[in-house]
Each structure stands twice: as structure tokens, then as C-alpha cells.
Amino acid sequence: MDFITVQKAFEILEKQIPLPTVQTLPLLAAKDAFVASNIFAPIAVPPFTNAAMEGYAIRWSDWHENKTIICSSIVKAGDTQCYQLSPGEAYKIFTGAPIPEGADTVVMKEWILSDDNQMKFLDKPIQKGDHIRTLGSQTQKNTLILNKGTKISSGIISFLSTFGITNLDVYRKPKVSLVITGDELIAPGETLKFGQIYESNGITLTTLLDDLGIEIVKLFYTKDTFSATSESIKAALECSDVVLITGGISVGDFDFVQASLQSIGINKLFYKVQQKPGKPIFFGSKISQYVFALPGNPAAVFSCFHTYVKPFLRKYMQPEGDFITFKKGTLLTPYQKKQGLTHWVKAYQEQNKLYFLQGQESYRMDAFSRANALVCLPDFMEQCSEGIELNYIDL
């Protein structure tokens, strides 16, 4: 297969996303998943009318008419008894305690003087309904509280827990494993020898997957031989829905990924995209499993993840969402390139104003320490003048 366009690669990827499957998870285990159905409030919140602060529950009319008010009882938080407030009575009440029947106002204790339980009110602006949280004032029972397709955050988990919800139906996350190739790679922390470099792609992909709420099933480091590469990919497929491979996908004497994938029976859906960086990117499938083979250069891995892998995985987990979302920005730094390849350019954006960064080569990662956007320059474009509008994705 010849080089394909970026747009064609997007179309192939989106068509391959499998139908979603739903699983029920405990609330705490659902973080970063996407809810698979609309959720309605099983109860009202608050579930009963209660005091918003410590003070005295009264009938506002008693105070307003200057009647003598006697404190006759106490209601504390957690009290399950239903009290009835009679005219001329006040109940000392604590924050969160249920409001007695008949009471309609809570007066803070600092505004009251008590003499033998008889209430004396200071000259304060007491309003009817003060310091009372009414039944369902936040949420009425059966109200829609979470839309299908919403990503579960810590705040949402906290919110749902107030309804007593313990389990959620969510779209299942894909199981993802990594295969990192390269004889020249050594683990960070070890002493570099001549000809060696520190392995960073595994760390890069681990943290990028974590941003999506995906925990890696297994991480394989493999030598640059056909047998080692094949065995690592086979082992990764045994425990994964999606396998990400870095390095070894070109046509050099020690690049064995493509031959290994062919021997394993991976159906090639595309190989090589008209883009820079990351031309030799591979995507294939085997029944309901998927393989992305990315170039070995760290910047190409980072770019290809954001432009192809991330949209695929996100749509896998959230079928209601778009495959990829571009924003519009105005270029403030001129740029020139040749026709024929789409360029993904590292940039810093602020208020949709785009500033291209130095260090665009595929081996250089320094620009990613400052970049928060990846700008798409179409294949036909050559001169990018200041002031033109361009598509970009957030990093």
C-alpha cells in the first residue's frame, strides 16, 4: 500500500472502532470512564429539610409578632425522630439536623440571648426561611443528574456518592499493552555507554495513556531480532485489546516489526502516512484486536499518539464523542514547508493565538516541554504567513 493522506488515515481508524461494550463498576473504580446511560436522581438531595447552621429553629411569625418563645428541646444531626414545633416554642438545632415540623426559620445562636430557656432576640435582620436547606433544594428526585457519555471525574464521583449510588454502568476501557523495541535503549538511571540512549517512549506512552485513564496491562522490552520481536507482540496480544509498538517499523536490516506482524496474522489497514513527523506509522487488526506501530523517534511517538492513537482510544471509550476535535487559531510566527506532506507542528497557544516553537525535528523533545498545541499544516500548504487561521489540537 502506498502512502495515504492524513484524512484517509482518520477515516480508516474511525471505521475500525469496535461497538462499545458496557460494564458495571463500583463508583470508585469508574474514574476516567464514560457513563453508558443517563443517570437520574434516586433520591432528593437534601433528602429532608435541615439546618444550614447551628442555632434555634423557630416559627418566624412568633418572632415577628414579638411573642414569648421558649427553648423546649434539642435536635442534633443524625436524629431520626420527627419533631413537632408548637407555637411559642424554639428548638436548639445543629447543622445538618432535621427541621421540626412547624419551624420555618433558623436563627443563629449569636443573635439570641437565653434566660431560663426564654429567648431574647438581638436587633438583627431575621428573614423568614433563614439558614434552612429545604428538601430537594439541590436536586429533586428523578431529575437527570448525569448525561450519557460524560467522563467520570473525581468531582462527579463525589457528587454521585451523595445520592447513595454505589455502581455505574460505563463503557469498557480497552486493555492496552506496549512493546518497546531497540537494542540501543537502556533504562533511565543506568550509565550510558557509547552508542546507547535512554529509553523514553515507554515512559511517554505510559503517562499519555494515564491521561486517558488507561492503565497499561503489560510493558515489553524486546531486542532487535525477528524471534524476540514476534514473541513480544504475541505475548502482548494475549492480554490486550490494543497493542502499541515503538521502533522497528521502517525497512532497515534490524527493523522486524512489520515482518513479525505479518507472521502473526495482523491485517495491515495502512502503513505510511503523508506526514511529518511519523511517516512510517502502521495500523492493523486481528479480529477485535488492534495494533499501532509507531516510529522510534520520541517526538514522532508523541505526535502520532495525539493524532491517531488518542482519538482511537477515546472514541473506543466514548462512542458519543467526536473522533478528533480541531480548534482554530491565528498564527503569529511565519513558517515555511514543502508541498506533499502534512506537517504536525509543535506550538504554544494562548487565547487561540499560535506561536511555533524551535526544535521541530522528530528526534527532539525539547519543544514538547513548552508546547500545548499541535498545529496541522495541510500537505498543499507551503508558505504559512502571520495572521492565517490554522487547525490545531490541544496537547
Image: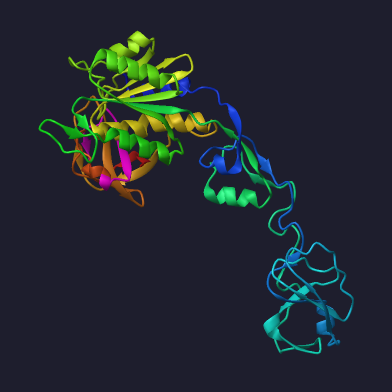
Residue at 74% in and 67% down: 97
Residue 64 seen: yes
Which quadrant holds residue 88? Answer: bottom right
- Residue in the picture at 32% in, 46% down: 372
Residue 2 visible in rendering: no
Residue depicted at 26% across the width and 46% down the height: 369
Direction from residue 212 to residue 274 in the image, left or right: left
- In the image, residue 151 sits, relative to residue 310, either above or below, namely below
Q: Quadrant of the N terminus?
A: top left
Magenta stretch contains residue 285: no
Nearer to us in this view, 385 or 67? 67
Q: Residue 24: image x %, image y %? A: 62, 34
Q: For residue 81, which quarter of the picture?
A: bottom right
How many numbered markers are drawn?
0
Q: Say above or below: 147 vs 291.
A: below
Point out residue 96 in the picture as x, y percentages from the top left corner. Answer: 70, 66
Q: Residue at x 25, y 26 (%)?
A: 341
Q: Which residues are magenta?
A: 369-384
| Quarter-of-image position of residue 229 | top left
Single out the residue that lies furthest toward the right: 86
Residue 36 horizontal/vertical position (percent)? 60, 34
388 left or right of 284?
left
As rendered, which of 32 and 181 lies closer to the eye?
Answer: 181
Q: Residue furthest left?
A: 194
Figure colour scheme: rainbow
Quadrant including the C terminus: top left
Is 62 placed left or right of 363 in the picture? right
Q: Is residue 370 magenta?
A: yes
Q: Nearer the viewer, residue 115 or 204?
A: 115
Residue 134 in the image, given as x and y percentages of width and height: 75, 63
